[in-house]
Image: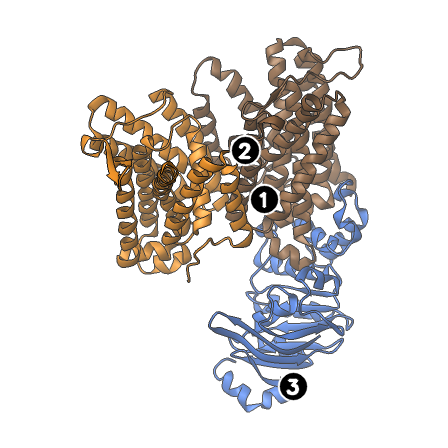
Amino acid sequence: MRVEGVSKRFGSLQALQDVSLTIEDGERRAIIGPNGAGKTTLFNLFMGDMLPSAGRLHLFGRDITNVPSHKRVHLGMARTYQILNLIHNVSVLDNVRLAIQATMPYRFGVFLSQDSYRGLFAEARGLLDAWGLWDKRNDRVEDLSYGEQRHVELIMALASKPKLLLLDEPTSGLSEAEGAEFVKRIRELGRETTLVVIEHDMDVVFGLADMITVLHQGQVIAEGSEQEIKGDIKVREVFLGEH
Amino acid sequence: MPQADQLALVLLNGVTFGMLLFLLAAGLVLMLGAMNIVNLAHGSFYMLGGFVGVAVAAKTGNFALAVLAGMGAVGFLGLVVERFFLRYLRDQMAQVLLTLGFVYIISDLARTVWGSDPLSLAPPSFLAGQIGIGDSFEYPVYRLALIGFSLLVWVGLWLFLERTRLGAIVRAGADDKEMVAGLGINIKVVFTAVFTLAALLAGLAGVVGTRVFTASLTLDWQVLGLALVVMVVGGVRSLHGVLLGSLLIGLVDRIGTFFVPELAMFLIFGAMALVLVLRPYGIIREHA
Amino acid sequence: MHRELLSGARVRCAAYVVGGVVVFVVVPQFISSYYVFVFTEILIYGIFALSVNMLLGYAGLISLGQAAFWGAGGYTVALITVQAGVDSFWLCICAAVVVATVLGGILGALALRTKGVYFILLTLALAQMVWALLSPWRSITGGTEGLYGIARPDLGLPLSLSSSLSFYFFVLVFFAVSAFVLYRVTRSPFGRVLVGIRENEQRMRALGYSTWRYLYVCFIVAAAFGGLAGALKVYQDGFVNPAYASLSTSALVLLMAMIGGTRVFGGPVVGAGVVWIIRSVVSSYTVYWNLLLGVLMVAVVMFAPAGIAGYLTGIGKRYGILEGRRRLQTLR
């Protein structure tokens, strides 16, 4: 993923200004910064949930600036949301099935019942089993505990077997233990999935990331390895009192 | 020249009709702007106002009383609908469907209580008759009075929205409920007030409009359709837009009916569709 | 594993089928022809309401313009039969569906440029345009009086369809096929995606679905079945007029779907039944049947948003205890 000179305005608010970064295949990148730094906005631009006011985005060598978000998923991108963005009034199982189905050729099928797609069912079962949610599969997703919903949020992103996975504060709202567990599972994802994580929790960041990008007020103020970031004065200033 | 006279008549009729539509559509826009509700029963409010007004006039022979009765009845109904029903619905779609239910209720209420005869309300004596304009042209005083009165209402609404604190709250209410609530203002009461005001306007329009708009049992749907067109064409968030839109639609309707009667309705709804497809915010955009 | 999931549904399905057969096949043979007429109306409106519910209940779109397709289907049949003098049933029906589908394609492409309230308004405007076109062209469409003299189709069968019972069974076949097709669509991957779009369109796009396309196809499907229903209605009544495409017709069918229940597949049919029973039965006791409809609608919206059928099948309550194994029927 390569982002060039990307900016985003909302009326008079400049959320992002001339941001450029390059994320390599198989990399684990963390994006950190104080609240309002523009991190989620950046993700929105990556994913196509919003269009940039200026700049270009490239994915796997291809210019995706004008590619709509639903097509980006088919190019191998997926994301989770900081504020849970699940499909309500629908069961856990169906949430996951919808997520898997999205990149399947039969997603336009009108004749056969969705239940009859055994492969879909088996794959959903596999994912839910791996995260211990199979027993809750028929519950409405909004009736699950917060931690479980976070799991589902992640499962839905994993369902399309993305090559680039964007995680927006995946441990937000989780207890320390839950968070640590979650991070462990994320780390178990192989290097064929490139990871970009927005996080506030520095332990998570340092335990997970190869490279860290620091955003402040819509601009990249530092970028580098854990050591470099820890030693960076600008970063220290910005985070004074934060950690 | 007969041609010019006829044209003048048509134009004035258009303006009259437009002002009547304005009274209706203003309420619709208020409700949509402040509360994000499309009140499908607004045409029914109009119809009910007309029926009540005529019934009271028949009993008492008093025009002013008829107007007040019409306004009051519909205003009260609006109050009840908002306070006891709409207020409890969060979902905008549910609110729209609820108002749809009330269309049926009001339709029967109006019809069965007041019968299904065509309506006509005699204006008060000081508004009866025609007034001369220019050399050979005469136009009903009543209609001119209607135009004037509606303009007053427009000014009044404008002053209310722009110059009073309550008006500012109404304008802000749709955009930021939480902020307004945070200022310690009871937004629910504001909403009820707005809805009731819109209903009062609709009832008023219904009573005074009986001499302008031929009444029928399908009046509620007819009127609703036109009011919605005005709202869309004029702008769902702008009072001045509503005025312009009303005049435009009133004129198009009357001129259309005069020159190409078959296509008048098509043109009107075509205009609405066009605006929605191209610019859903209407002719005048209001800046946030 | 699969068996565990499906057996309860199979039993329920069988129960519905048996119940359906009793109500729709057995009962009509024993009642007066007036009530057979009512049953036929219920079936025809049932198809219409099911089509509207594809948009309302499954895709989450309120369209105030579905009567445009009902009218398109009806007028197509009338035009072919009366104006062109061609007496072929199958041609008429197919043409009606095709015309409605094409119209759906055009109106859908325009209407779906908007969302929410604007969608409601635009569908209203577009349908009113269609309606407004039907009155003026007296020579073609018969103006405000419409066209009449459409006889029941002559299929060369030994039974004449002019008897209400035989026409009823004729319509029943169409109803069964339509209901079956629409049911399969709702349970298909396509149908599930519609529900997802209804609940959270943005997330569905972020999962990779081209949501506009799904909504567009749904709109067209609804239009097609609306046209079919309209065509059947013309054969039932023998005439057509602009009221077919009127706003009040669009509203009535929404009412049916809502009262019957938008979240249960068969709900709209229940709604059509309820509305018709009120219309025909209640109206012999009192004139206030509109009032009753309105009250019912208000009651449903306020207290039982899942509709009558929803309430009966337990979906109205948050957790329907349908059978021991499943805590909640998932996507219907």
Disc 1 crowd, CA 10 A, few/some/many (<14, 14-19, 20+): many
Q: Amino acid at mark 1?
A: Gly
* Whole-percent x, y for residue B185 in the image: 30, 55
* Whole-percent x, y for residue A238 in the image: 50, 84
Q: Would residue B147 be seen by someone viewing this image from the given angle?
A: yes
| In-front residue for pair B138/C330 | B138
Q: Amino acid at mark 2?
A: Gly
Q: What chain does badge 2 belong to?
A: C
User: Residue at left 35%, top 48%?
Assistant: B191
Instruction: Give the letter of the orange chain.
Output: B
Image vertical order of residue B273 relative to residue B264, above or below: below
Image vertical order of residue A16 relative to residue B109, above or below: below
Closer to the chain start, of discs 2 and 1, is 1
Name the element at disc 1: loop
Q: Is residue C46 left or right of residue A59?
A: left
* Whole-percent x, y for residue A85 in the image: 59, 58
Question: Residue C307 shows which numbered tag?
Answer: 2
User: Residue at left 66%, top 32%?
Assistant: C227
- How far apart, in angstroms, are the residues tagged by discs 2 and 1? 15 Å
User: Residue at left 38%, top 46%?
Assistant: B247
Q: Which residue is mark 3?
A: A224
Q: Amino acid at mark 3?
A: Gly
Q: Which residue is mark 1?
A: C60
Tell me, yes or no, whether the two marked residues, 1 and 3, touch with CB atoms within 8 Å: no
Instruction: Give the letter of the blue chain.
Output: A
